[in-house]
């Protein structure tokens, strides 16, 4: 769905939106124009109705073009006073009640203009124009038409209208800023939800890959081995079948946990899952690494394991990460190097850092020739993601000659 590009306006009595809002706004504009036009009809000079009608007509565009409308109204007012001071007959009345159009135009500039300086310019223009009424404008033939008392009255009216319009303008901007803030907060919340869903999907994908790839690789190799020695060595076949059963049970437990995460949305790595009515999540510790090694030996690998990590030095999440990295490495060795390969697993904790190193000899196969080649597929991507989430570093690549190495360092939270 395309994301909304504009920020909606505030839903208040000052900000009209939608078809009904536009109709009300247009009715207000027409009402103001009629007030000016009716006021002009009370005067009998030749150009009063024409000037008042032009002022009223220009006020219809006060919302979209407030600055232009005020300039037009001020110009018509100047023409009005210039015509008033011409010799007989009187062509226009001045001052006249339809000059209220100037105040309406100023109010429109203050309330609807987007430029910060426009309200102040509009107020200053009206104050200067009325102030000029006490001295006149000889260049235009306009004689003085206000005494100091009337000037104070006009200035008081102007300031009252300006302050009212400015208060409404400020309230409208505040309401719009609140609406914009709410809109952005909603978009940010949606983005956070999408990112959380993406992280959860990535975690579930890693878990599925680790469970399915490793379990199936071990079970397939054990099944092939059991089939080949079933008649010659029943004891070895029985051991292989037991390994298949144990691996399958662990895989089923992990699959049940992943399904509960999908149904209940309770994702998390490294801590027991006690949500829901099902059994708690199987807590995986570094002791499980030795179980992995035993199953890999039964599958035909030569595995040497060294775990030099004090008890309680790692959090459950860190132990889970280490276990999954070793599990994926053994899976890759089984898939690419096959039976007969030697694997060396080293885990140690030094100065608040868990160091993981897994190397294999590739069963003597030269790097880049056939089964010894390993691409950066989902397994390596998953290991790298796990380490980066934990704030560590990850390195994987072929060894000189034959085999493969994986190194990871993860900062630990010492208990």
Image (tube, helix red, strand yellow):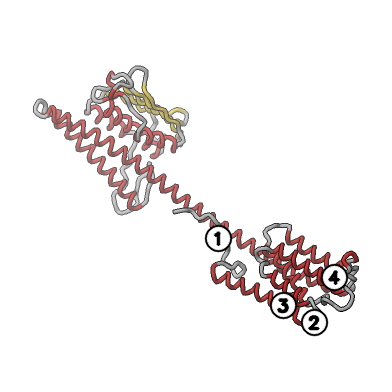
* Label 2, label 3: how far apart the Cα atoms are: 13 Å
Q: Which mark is residue 37?
A: 3
Identified at 86% across, 67% down, the residue is 131
Residue 41 at what x, y percent from top left?
75, 81
Quarter occupied by residue 58: bottom right
In this view, the residue in front, 409 or 380, is 380
Label 1 neighbour load within 10 Å: few <14, some 14-19, many 20+: few
The reply, left or right, for residue 370 in relation to residue 40 is: left
- Say if mark 1 contacts mark 3, CB within 8 Å: no
Q: Read off the residue under disc 1.
A: 8
- Say if mark 2 contacts mark 3, CB within 8 Å: no
Q: Secondary structure at mark 4?
A: helix
Q: Nearer the viewer, mark 1 or mark 2?
A: 2
* Label 1, label 2: how far apart the Cα atoms are: 48 Å
Q: Secondary structure at mark 1?
A: loop
* Label 4, label 3: how far apart the Cα atoms are: 20 Å
Q: Which mark is residue 82?
A: 4
In this view, the residue in front, 92 or 203, is 92
Residue 49 at what x, y percent from top left?
75, 77
Label 4 neighbour load within 10 Å: few <14, some 14-19, many 20+: some
User: Mark 2 or mark 3: which comes first in sequence?
Assistant: 3
User: Mark 4 or mark 2: which comes first in sequence?
Assistant: 2
Q: Which mark is residue 85?
A: none
- Position of the N terminus by quadrant: bottom left
Label 3 neighbour load within 10 Å: few <14, some 14-19, many 20+: many
Q: Which mark is residue 44?
A: 2
* Label 1, label 4: how far apart the Cα atoms are: 46 Å
Q: With respect to residue 381, does 5 lie above or below?
A: below
Identified at 35% across, 44% down, the residue is 204
Quarter occupied by residue 217: top left
- Say if mark 4 contacts mark 2, CB within 8 Å: no
User: Mark 4 or mark 3: which comes first in sequence?
Assistant: 3
């Amino acid at each position: 769905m395309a994301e909304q590009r504009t920020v909606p306006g505030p839903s208040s009595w000052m900000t009209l939106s939608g078809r009904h809002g536009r109709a009300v706004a247009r009715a207000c504009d027409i009402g103001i124009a009629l007030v000016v036009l009716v006021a002009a009809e009370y005067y009998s000079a030749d150009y009063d109705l024409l000037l008042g009608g032009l002022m009223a007509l220009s006020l219809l565009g006060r919302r979209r073009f407030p600055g232009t409308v005020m300039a037009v109204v001020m110009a018509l007012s100047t023409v009005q006073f210039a015509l008033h001071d011409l010799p007989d007959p009187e062509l226009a009345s001045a001052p006249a009640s339809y000059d209220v159009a100037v105040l309406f135009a100023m109010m429109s500039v203050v309330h609807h203009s987007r430029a910060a300086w426009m309200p102040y310019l509009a107020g200053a223009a009206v104050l200067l124009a009325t102030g000029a009424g006490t001295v006149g404008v000889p260049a235009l033939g306009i004689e003085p038409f206000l005494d100091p008392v009337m000037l104070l009255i006009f200035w008081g009216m102007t300031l009252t209208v300006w302050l009212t319009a400015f208060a409404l303008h400020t309230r409208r901007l505040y309401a719009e800023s609140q609406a914009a803030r709410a809109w952005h907060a909603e978009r940010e919340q949606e983005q956070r939800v999408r990112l959380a869903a993406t992280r959860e999907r990535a975690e579930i994908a890693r878990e599925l890959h680790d469970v399915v790839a490793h379990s199936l690789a071990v079970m397939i190799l054990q099944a092939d081995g059991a089939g080949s020695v079933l008649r010659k060595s029943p004891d070895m076949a029985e051991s292989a079948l037991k390994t298949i059963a144990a691996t399958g049970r662990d895989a089923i437990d992990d699959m049940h946990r992943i399904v509960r995460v999908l149904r209940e949305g309770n994702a998390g790595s490294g801590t027991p899952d006690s949500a829901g009515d099902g059994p708690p999540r199987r807590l995986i510790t570094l002791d499980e690494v030795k179980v992995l090694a035993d199953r890999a030996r039964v599958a035909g690998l030569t595995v040497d394991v060294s775990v030099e990590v004090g008890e309680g030095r790692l959090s459950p999440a860190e132990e889970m990460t280490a276990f999954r990295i070793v599990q994926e490495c053994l899976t890759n060795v089984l898939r690419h190097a096959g039976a007969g390969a030697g694997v060396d697993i080293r885990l140690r904790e030094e100065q608040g850092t868990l160091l993981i190193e897994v190397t294999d000899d590739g069963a003597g196969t030269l790097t880049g020739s056939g089964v010894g080649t390993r691409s950066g597929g989902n397994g390596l991507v998953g290991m790298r993601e796990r380490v980066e989430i934990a704030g560590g570093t990850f390195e994987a690549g072929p060894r000189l000659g034959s085999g493969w190495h994986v190194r990871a360092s993860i900062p630990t939270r010492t208990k």
